[in-house]
Structure formats: C-alpha cells, structure tokens
Amino acid sequence: MVSRKIAITLGLYVGLLGPAWGQNHALESDHVAINTQAHWRNWKFVEGTLNVAANGEVVPAFVEKGNNAVLDILDHLQRTAEDPANTSILDAIEAGSNPDAVANLFDGDETTYWEPDPDSPLRDWWFQIDLGRLINATNIGLKFVPEGQGDPFLQFVVLTADNADKGAQIAGNIPMHQVYRTPSDNKVQRSFEFDLDRGELIDPVAGVDFAGDMVRFVQVVITESDGARGIEVSAEEYETLTGLDKGGVAFFKKVGEGEVEVEAAIYEAIDAEAQGAVRYYRRERPRLAELEVYELGQNIAQGMVLERNGSAESSHEGSVGNLVDGEGTYLTFNLKSFPIGNVAFGERFLEFDLGASFWLDTVQMWYNLSVAGGQLSGASFHVYEIQTSDGTSAPGGGLLWTAPEQVRGLGTAHEVNTFPPIHARFLRVAYPFSSSESGREGNKARPREVQLYGEGHHPEVELVSGLIPLQGAKNLVSIEWDADTPEGTSIEIQTRTGNEVADDYRYYDSGGVEVAAGKYEKLGFFKKGRIDTLEVAGADWSNWSAPYAQSGDPIASPSPREFLLMRARLRTQDPMSAAALRSIRLNFNPPVAQQLQGELDIGVFERLGEPQEVSLFIKPIFAPLDLGFDEILVRTPPDMSLAFSSLRLGSLSQWENGEAEQLADVQVMQTRSDSLWLRLDRLVQQGGQTDLIEVKFTTALFSTGIVLQAAMGNSSLENSWQQVDPGDVTELAKTQGLQILASVLDNKVLGDVQIQPAVVTPNGDGVNDAMTFDFTVRRLSGVRPVKVQIYDLSGRAVRILDVQKPIVAGKYSIDWAADDERGRVVPPGIYILRIKIDVDSDSQVQQTGIQRLLHVAY
C-alpha cells in the first residue's frame, strides 16, 4: 500500500462550477448526497444482506423459509464453477429429449413448458436437474400447462437423489430414490405436490422429526403416453388441427354386437354396411410448465465462505469448509483417546463465521452413517452443545457465547436442533474429547453437512461508502438522513475524514477470482487476471466518529478535510421488522481556516467540584481563500459550567515579548451553562497577524475526566462552525490536547509512576513499538491484586493487564504493545491508563488508584 498526499490546486476548484458525480455519491456545491439506487449499490456491504430498491431505499434483506430452491440454481452453480461467467442454467440440466426447453420449468411462467420430442422414443422422455447444492427438501410440485394449451403426463415417476456418492455422480449413474409414481392414467390433474420424508432411519428414535429429505438431484420420467391418440375429437375439429396437434384416426369394423379396429385399407375395402365408427384424435401434447422444489429454508451455511467471506474452522482439524459447501462430503473427527484413568480430555469444537448476522432458529447435522451386522458402525457426535455469538466481545477477551441448545447425538442420519430465534454471527458446535465408553457411541463422528436455518430480516447490516473526494478541503458542518425506524429498529451513521489516500492493489486470476498478491505472482502467464488499484484511507485519517444521535447533528469528525468516508448500520431486534434508509446528506461550507489546533494549559484537576481557571490556546493556520472567524465556541459535558474570564491574541513575536493583546470588547452570547459562545470585535483571517489565541475561563470538574470541545465560526455565514483539533500548540501549555482528568491526592498507596516512551508507535520498526508502566506500591502488605487496565476515551475497556504478586508491596514494571484483548493493534489516539488496588473500607490510605493519558500514533 503506497500513501500519497493530495495537494490542493486551482484545478480542483474548477470542478466546483457544477455538480460532480461519483459512483457512490453526488457532490454538489455545498453538500454530498447519497440518494439513488446506483449510489447505494456502489457502497460496500456483504452480498445478499441488503435490498436496494429502484427509488433508492435500502432495507436489510429477508431470509426466507419454505423457498423454491429451483429459482436460484444458477447462483449456486456459479459460486463453485471454474468459469462462472460462462456457466448457465443449462449446465444444471440433463434430458433424454429437448434439453434446452427444461429451463422453462424455472421461469415462473405457466405458459412456457418442457415437452418431449414426439418423434423420440418413450425411453428418452425424461429430464434431470441439479439444484447446485444439497438441500433439505420438504416437498416437490409439478404444474402442467393450463387446459387447452396441452396435456399432463399420462403416467410418470418422480425421483430424487443426494450426492453422497461422488463417484456415481461423476460417472452419470446416480442412485435415485422414488418419490412418486402415478397409480393410473392421468388425463385431468394438472397440479401435483409430493411431501418428502427422510426415508428409513438407520436407528429411529421416537419423538425426533426431520422434515423432508436431503436432495441434490430431481428426475422426472414419463412412463406412459397416449401419443397420437391423446384426446378424441369430432371429424370437424380434426380438420381444424394443424401440425403436430393432428393425431391419429381409428377405423372400426362391425362384428356382431360390437366393433373391432382395422387398418384404414381394410376399412375402405369392406361393404358400407360392415363399416363401423371412425374416431379422430388430437395428439397428446405432454407439457410441464413448472417444477418447484421447496426447501426448509435458505440454508444460511451455504455461501458463508465463498460469498460472505466467512469461515468454517475446527479447533483441531483446521478448515471444515466441506461441511457447508452443499456437496455432502463427510469428514471424520476423533472423539476418543486412549483412556488414562477416567480423565476427560477437554472440549473441541467446530466454529463458523457466518459472514453476516442472521436470526438463527435451527441447526441440522447430517451424518455419514452405515449399518454393519445390524449395528451402528458410523456415529454422530456423542454429546454436543450448540453455541452462538452475535459478535459481542467477552470481558476477558474473545467472543461472548450463549448456548441455546444442548443435545445428545441420536445415531440417526439427521439430527434437528430447534430453538427460539437468536441473533447469530458466529456458531459453535462444541463436543467433548474423552475416553468415555458407553452405549452406541463410536470412536469417530462423520458429519457430512451442517445446515443452518432462520427467518427474518438480517439483525445487523453494515454498509460503507468508498472514498468521497470533496474537491478540496471542506468544513464539514452537519449530517442529515431520511429513514424509517419502526419500533425495535435503529440506524447508526458514522463518518471518518482525512487528507491522505493510499493505493491498495487487488489481484485476480483469469477467472475473475480475487487472490493474494503472493499467489498471483506464482500464477502462470495465462492464469493471471487483472490488477485493480483502489484508493483507500491514508495514514492521517481519523477513527470513526461516535454514531450521530439524530438527523441534523453537527459533524464530529475532524474538519476541514479533503476526503470523507461514511458508514451506516441498520439494526433490528424483531426478525419481522426492518429499518429503511433512503438518503444521507452531508452539508459543508468553505473552511474558516485550513487548520485549527487547541491545547489546554491544565490537564489534571487536583480537586473535584472546585472551580479552577483554565486557559485554552488555539493556533489557526490559514490559506488565502479561507473565510476567517470571529466567533469561538467552547463546550463541556452537561454537569459542568463555564464562566468567561478573558481573551488574548497576537502574533508569535507579540506572545514572546509579552505583548499579546487582551480584547476588551468580547461579547458573551447567550447559550447553555455548559457552553461558552464568544463573539470577537474583529475577523481573524489570513494576514491578520494572529498566530495564537488564549481563551481563559473558570470551570469545575465533577467526573474522572472529560474531553473539551471547541469550534470557530464566521458570524456572516450560517453553520460555519469548524472544529478545533487537539494538538501541541504552544510552550505555554503542556497537555498537548483537550482532555481534563481528575487527580487523587493524599496518603498515596500508588506512586512513582513513569511511562516510557511518551508515545507508542506500534508500526513494527522496532522503535517505540511498546511502552512500559513503572510504579511502586506502598503502605500495603499481604496478597492483593493490582488492577492495570487501559480504556479508550469512551470508557470502553481495551486491555486488561492485572497482576498479582505474593507480596503486593514493591516495584512493578508492565509492558503494553498497544494491543487489545484479541491481540490486535489499537487505533491511533489517546487512551487512559488506570491502576487500582482494592483496599479495606476502613483503611486510612488514599490514592489507591491513578490514571494517566497514553498516546498511540502510527
């Protein structure tokens, strides 16, 4: 990834003469808009999780139960095909006659049909479809064309097969299971539906119900036909028939009280008195309009790896993607070891990242079982627990798991586990690994498929814009959106901003499949595909802002900036309800300055609740076209109040010489007590000899810490407020930021705290990749835990480094590599170190806890 700085040139401003359109947004003179189908489709989201309507409305997709599996055959074929672009529905079809017309059975149009070639032999009147994956089919339906447009099959048989026998599949000799056979000739019935069952169980267990059967292939065979004598018609009607509709003519000779059929030549040769009836027929036109194969539901497991970038792993055997690929290939898992006493050897598990969030209510296990000598020779997992996680982190690290269902392996080919709908992003099937010997349990489990079902709108969908260039630095003012959020649903919108972009390269093989850079280099010349260059966020980008509370909120990301990213999350707590997002609009103005940085002279308040005077230093940097400012806004949390003292400004030389000007005519505007809104008697702008401003005010701190917010505005322009970013502004202040923390004093237990280096840069260059916390513990004896914990500024625990020594008193040295509980490097920013020791309630000591600011940059 190569980073590069985007310079602001005159050419960039030329584009402001009219609206500039990007694939994922529209850029106007004063705002960015996302409000069309084309915009949303060019945002990044997990495939299949979002419906984007023609009017630009986006809604989390609905996962169905009882869906018709033939409607998405092509999607599944293309997912596993070597050449998806040249894969068609015809690749799923085999037929003895008229194979191209079989595709009409999946188009939802009852006026299109498959009809065998009447000139081909009856043995060729069959077709077979490959559903593209193994499904839990519940019923099969056949619909023939409406009356007057053709005939139903006279007699036929419907067969199904799974794909357990790969060798037979490759050889084209798939063992089929009969689902239905017509008991007699059928001339009238035009709609059939057959319920499927699981067939004969190897080891039936009372009370266990598996709805349907495992199906990959469906075959329909016509076994009888009336051919040229489909329907008897009058002589007049017969003359109106054309083409293949004109059937046979039967001639009859009178014999006693009855008639016998004779050849036409014989009929013509006999006396008129002996001639019997002549019967005319319309040819039978066996036309099947639709084939429907209904499954239990959309199998959430299929597509999790190839389409949603999820994963299927085993705690001990590595990848288990075969269990979710719809192919039915079984894997073998050892369940027992050689016994050592009666010791259990712990738990193993299969873990699945579904690639997106779903409402999950059914987990089915399908095994490779066989019978030898009347005994079960292949077995399911003995006892297992189904665990789910919505992605929430556990306090001690990792994921927070819940267990909606615990079952015993039943020894059947299929096991069904149902439970109330639960929000799941991750799934575990946990099973014991022990020396247990009991009942029918074998030494191995041989699962073929893990199938997951649920119903409802995705509980959480995230979509992220691509980079949005603003055609020069813009002061981002506010964000608005149009949406519907029914009860139990919500929409969360966030922003990121920056000035630098980086080039990120994506590599593809000749089939269009993305591959790693290393693998791409090893491909042969004709196997290499395209290389895409994408612009992504560079090194100076902010973290994601806090979610905006309501439409119209001011922008929380640093501004002015040249580039923007937006992220939206649509959530629901009700599977049957969903939020709908139609548009986002981000408003901007020309900047009042290119950069505004602020620093407080005091970062720690010694006493809570006591007023203290504070100086806020602000350093503006201007470009020639910047508007300048004449207003200052300072904000604190609602439990604090601000009282203005004075304001000074001047050039660097004036500050160095003690000649900074104190403004006498500063207007304090009416606002809330937690805000200080000042209007100056002049416009501060480029060439005005103002390099530094000091705003002095009095306030009291009541919490353990806050982050001050400040902004500068131009009174001649509505919504011109521009944020002040924290930074190292002047030697007159030492905090390098806008944070105020509370200090705990007197009778200290913790002391001598040192943090080295002052800033950690975990970029792997071997310099300042980690920081060390040195401190001493005094005035305590015995064994006590020392809590060493790191939090972000929102109060969320990032890293727990608690320690315990046999004797609590002494020196401590703890290293932190700027990582979180999952071992990931934390985003750059400011963090809070809290060191605390629990003491008895009647203890007379103080400072049992301290906190410090930690700085991470890279």
Image (cartoon, grey):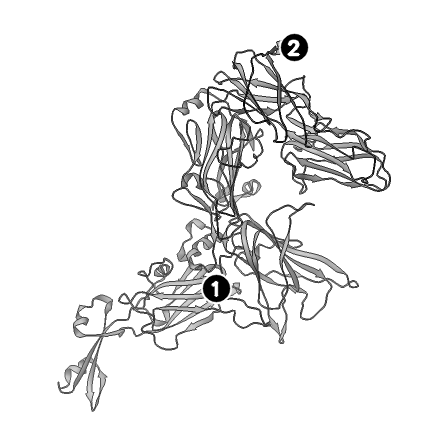
Which numbered disc flags the more N-terminal residue, 1 or 2?
1
Quadrant of image for the C terminus: top right
Q: Mark 1 and mark 2: span between their CA atoms?
A: 83 Å
Choose top left, top right, bottom left or bottom right for residue 280. Answer: bottom left
Please determine whether, in this image, residue 349 is positioned above or below residue 176.
above
* Whole-percent x, y for residue 656 in the image: 65, 10
Amino acid type at image mark 1: Ala
- Count neighbours of disc 2 (C-alpha within 10 A) and say few if under 14, some if 14 to 19, many if 20 or more: few
The label shown at residue 223 is none
Query: Can residue 96 be seen in this snapshot?
Result: no
Viewer-proximal residue among 837 and 376: 837
Choose top left, top right, bottom left or bottom right for residue 739. Answer: top right
Counting the numbered discs, the total is: 2
The label shown at residue 656 is 2
Viewer-proximal residue among 371 and 686: 686
Which residue corresponds to mark 1?
A: 137
